[in-house]
Amino acid sequence: MPANSPFPYDFTWGAATASYQIEGAAHEDGRGESVWDRFSATPGKVRNGDSGEVACGFYHRYRDDIALMKELGLDAFRFSIAWPRIVPAGRGAVNQAGLDFYDRLVDELLAQDLEPFATLFHWDTPQALEDAGGWPVRATAEAFREYAAVVVQRLGDRVRFWTTHNEPWVHAWIGHAWGEHAPGRTSEADAVAAAHHLLLSHGWAAEEIRREVPDAEVGITLNLTHAYAASDSPEDEAAAWRVDGEGNRWLLDPIFRGSYPADLLDRNELVAPLVEEGDLQTIAAPIDFLGVNYYFRFVVSGGADGPQMERIANAQETDMGWEVYPDGLYQLLMRVSRDYAPPAIYVTENGAAFGDVRVHDGRVHDPERTAYIASHIEAVSRAVAEGAPVRGYFVWSLLDNFEWAHGYSKRFGIVYIDYPTLERVPKDSFYWYRDYIASARQAPRPSSVA
Ligand code: FCB
């Protein structure tokens, strides 16, 4: 801990989760089927046949988990709302019992002095909408707008911080082009269409939020990955720029500049017929903050078959096979601040999976995770010191949870879940984060030093 904390007093310390990954209660209180229920039930799609049916049981245990957040000393909790709990058939009838759950959750957070950061969509589309064409069709964006309006009407008197979408790139490409996430499609055209409609629905949802919540802070969360060229050869530089375009600029440019990056010709051909008059203005309406999720970097070389991702010899990797590279977060925050000038940035996810075990003392010792989080917070502090408008940091994740196609095999939590019993066991990284937050608040500020 630096003697002078670079973090301002009102810096937000948080933890993040997502509905399908933690809630369970998949068939309770009128919840409809989501694409992740269907995908998980399809043999061969999710490791070990796991699903979010029970997950962490957060739906019933949220009070205990909020007590853990309190023990951590968090300022804020980032969670997502399950669309199929609210509008089980995707459009039409609203399920009051689903709204009631988030109502209780928000009230309990506020009662414990925790700021709710609500995300409207973290990939659990109602299956009925997928059956009607899914995100590749424009009607799904319209349905999302209706759903957003319902949610903000109910929670907008208490929730100020709203994120429309989580990682539209991942949902569009991994879910629609690579087939590795729900809904499991394998078409580049579907991915491009899904991404456009996700962005469009972001703009529409932002309008609904602003209408209902005049002092709302509205943002969108992107997974951004700094792309480094493997060498300074023109081929490697061009390949890194291409990867940056596909993963970063394809979302950042429409949101902040109102246009798709012109250098990605094949994608422009696919998206052009879908872009209607006014879409890009809707997408580019000013936001209050950008959410940045960061886990690793890319090192890219050029080749005859297009850009290649290089694996760095002897680099430390997490259980996901992701390189540990904190400086990539610093570089990314500086670059996004310089090139896109968002009014504020929240690091809405950052963390690491390791093969944790609960040992004979009953505890979970996870020094690698602590080192990962500490080094990435240090990277954030450098960006803050150099003027990047970062206002908060959310660790991914509060709890071990359903890690999508990896099922329960990857543990990202600072709290261990014993899945057979759902017992919560704070890991060593939990106590480290608690102590870090406390000391960051106490440290003298540079401005207060004469
Ligand atoms: C992000 C997702 C989150 C979690 C982490 C590890 O891409 O937003 O749900 O799976 O990765």
Image (cartoon, rainbow, N blue to C red):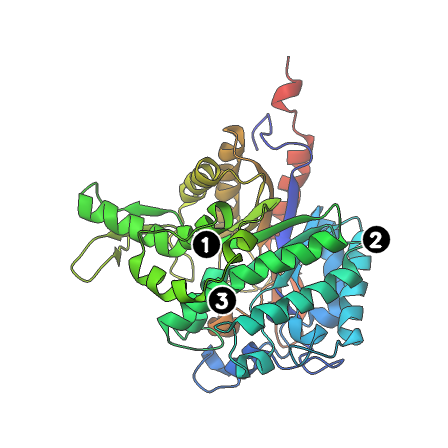
Nearest to the observer: residue 168 or residue 194:
194
**CA distance separating discs 3 and 1:** 28 Å
Q: Position of residue 195 (x, y in %)?
A: 47, 64
- Give the foreground label among 3 and 1: 1
Point out the frontmost of discs 2 and 3.
2
Q: Image quadrant of residue 16?
A: bottom right
- Number of disc labels: 3
Q: Which mark is residue 410?
A: 3
Q: Position of residue 90 (x, y in %)?
A: 64, 77
Residue lying farthest to the left in this orientation:
304
Task: Name the residue type under label 1.
Answer: Leu
- Give how far apart the Cα atoms at labels 1 and 2 are: 36 Å
Choose between 246 and 19: the one closer to the eye.
246
Residue at (45, 36) in percent of width and height: 334
Residue on which the image places disc 2: 111
The disc label shown at residue 337, or none: none
Q: Visible in this render: residue 63?
A: no
Residue kind at label 2, given as amino acid type: Ala
- Image height of 293 relative to 52, above or below: above
Using the rendered image of the protein, determine whether residue 406 is visible from the camera's viewpoint: yes
